[in-house]
Amino acid sequence: MSSAPAPQPGPQPAPPPPAVEVEGATVRYGDVLALDDVHLTLAQGRLCALLGTNGSGKSTLLRTVLGLNPAARGTVRVLGRGPAAARRAGLLGYVPQSEQVDWAFPVRVIDVVMMGRYGRMGPLRRPRRADREAVEAALERTGLADLAHRQIGALSGGQRKRAFVARGIAQGAQVFLLDEPFAGVDRPSEATIIEVLTAMRDEGHTLLVSTHDLAGVPRWCDEAVLLQRRVVAHGSPQEVLSPERLMSAFGAGPAPAPADEGCAA
Amino acid sequence: MSGLIEWVTVPLQFDFMVRALLVSAVAGAVCALLSCWMTLTGWSLLGDAVSHAVLPGVVLSYLLGLPFALGALVFGAGSVALIGVVNRTSRVKEDAAIGIVFTAMFAVGVVLISRVPSETDLMHILFGNVLGVSDGEIAQVLVMAALTTAVVLLKHRDLTLYAFDPVHAHAIGLSPRRLEALLLGLLSVTVVIALQAVGIILVVAMLVIPGSTAYLLTDRFERMLAIAVAVSVGASVVGTYVSFYADIATGGTVVVAQAAVFALAYLFAPRHGVLPRRRAAGRAAAAR
C-alpha cells in the first residue's frame, strides 16, 4: 500500500458527466440525410421521451448512441466515455423495436435476460451464481418471474418489452435506449411499462424512450426531445409539445412524409 | 427380431459399409448442429451457394494431389468473402450476389473437369460416393468434424446471441461481425464434410432439413440441437442401410429419409404441426 497523498479537495467537485452527449451527429444513408447536426445532452437520472414522426431519425439517433451508425460526423459520449468503452463496460441497455425481433426464436424469457450478462462472463458464457441471481432479480423487478420459462413469443406485447428491459437490468446498464416500446401495446400494459421505467429513473438510471405517440407523453416523462432530423426542441414535455413547436416541426396538418428512411432504423 | 438383427449386422461385414455409415453419421451430426443456426439466421441458401462454389477447389485438389478438403475450404470461404465484397461494393443485392458467385464458381469447376484428364468423376462429386470413400478422406472428415463440433459446442451461446439479437451483442461490446465470420467459417467446413456423404447438390438438404424439423418440435434451443442431431444421424444410418439393400444412391436415400421425418414433423408436431394446430383452432372455435 503506497500512501499517496489524498487528492486535494478541490474548490468544487467535478459535476457528474451527462448520461448521453451527442455533438454534431450527422448520418446519411446514401443520399438521404437521416440526422442533420444533432446536438443532445441528457443529464443522468432522467426519463426522456424522444419524439418524432416515422422517418424523423429517432431510431437512427438511438443506433448512433449505440455506435451502430458510425456517424459521418460528430461525437457521442456515454457517461463521459467513448461509445466503445461504454459498450464494453455494459453501460448501454437496448430495447429493440418489436419488428426487429424474431418472436418465434426458440429462447425462453430467462435465456433472453441471461444474454444481458454475457458481457460479464468468460468466453464460454457459462452462467455463475452471480449471473443467475442478477437474472432472477431482474425478472422479479419487471414482474416476469412467473413467466421466466415461457418462450419469448408466448408473452404479451407489454411483457415482451419488460423482458428486454429486464435484460438491461441484469446487464447492469446505466443508460437505457428504448425504441418505440409502446407500439402495439395496449394501455394497461403501457402503464405497467411506464411504472417500471419510472422506478428505474428513481434509482438513478437514465432512459431515452422513442415514441411517435405524442398524446400520451406528458404524463410520464421528465423531459422531451422533438426530433425532425435535427433537434427541434428539448425541454419539459409541455414546452416541447406546444402547438407552436409542433407547427414549426411538422408544418400545419399531418407531418409531411420525409423521404423514406428505408426504416434504416 | 432375429431378422432385424441380421438386417443390421450383415452389411457391417463389409468394410465399405462401415466406412460409409461412419462418414454419413458424422457428417449428419455436424450438419445438424449447424443447421439449427442456418434455420434461425435465414442463411439456408448460403449453404447451397457455398457447396456449389467448392467444386473448382475439389477438382484442383485432385489435380495437384492435395487433400480435397484444402481446395474445398479455400474456395468455400473464398466464395463467402466474394459474395460479401460484391454485395457491399456494388448496388447488386445480396441474393443476386449469391446467385452470381456460386453459379460462376460452379461453372469454373465444370469447365475444369471437362478439360482435366483424371479419375475425378463429376457424378461422384455432385452426388456423393460415400460407399467408395478412402482412408485419407475419412481422416479429413473426422478431423474437420471434431474441430467444428468442439467450436460449436464451446461458442454456442455466442452464436445464438448473434442469431437472436446482433444489436445487443454489439451493445455489450461483443463483435457481431466476428461472430458472423465464425459462423460462416463453420458453415464452410461443414459443407466440405457433407460433400463426402451426399455430394455437392444435396449438401443444402443436410444443412436445412434437420434444423427445420427440430424447430417444429421444440421451443428450446438446446433441445433443438439435440433433436436435429438425432433426426439427422438417424436418417443417415437408415438411409445408408436402405441404399445398401435396395441398391440405390446413398446420398439421395439419406436426404429422402430426412425429408420423410420433416414431413412427419410438419404434419404432426405437437404444437407447431399443421394437423394439431388445425385441431386446436377447431376446438377453440367450438368452445366459443
Image: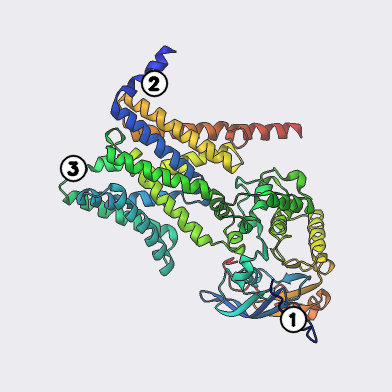
Q: Position of residue B180 (x, y in %)?
A: 49, 57
Can residue B215 be spotted in the picture? no
Point out the image quarter for the N terminus of chain B. top left
Q: Nearer the viewer, mark 1 or mark 3?
A: 1
Label placed on residue B119:
3
Q: How far is the residue under mark 2 from the one under mark 1?
A: 81 Å
Tell me the kind of residue under disc 3: Glu
Q: Residues within 10 Å of mark 2 (few under 14, many from 20)?
A: few
Labels 1 and 3 positioned on one and the same chain: no
Q: Residue at x 30, y 55 (%)?
A: B105
Residue for badge 1? A7
Residue for badge 2? B8
Q: Residues within 10 Å of mark 3 (few under 14, many from 20)?
A: few
Q: Position of residue A38 (x, y in %)?
A: 65, 80
Tell me the kind of residue under disc 1: Pro
Task: Identify whether A50 is placed above or below A152.
Answer: below
Q: Residue at x 77, y 44 (%)?
A: A146
Point out the image quarter for the C terminus of chain B. top right
- The answer for which chain carries disc 3 is B
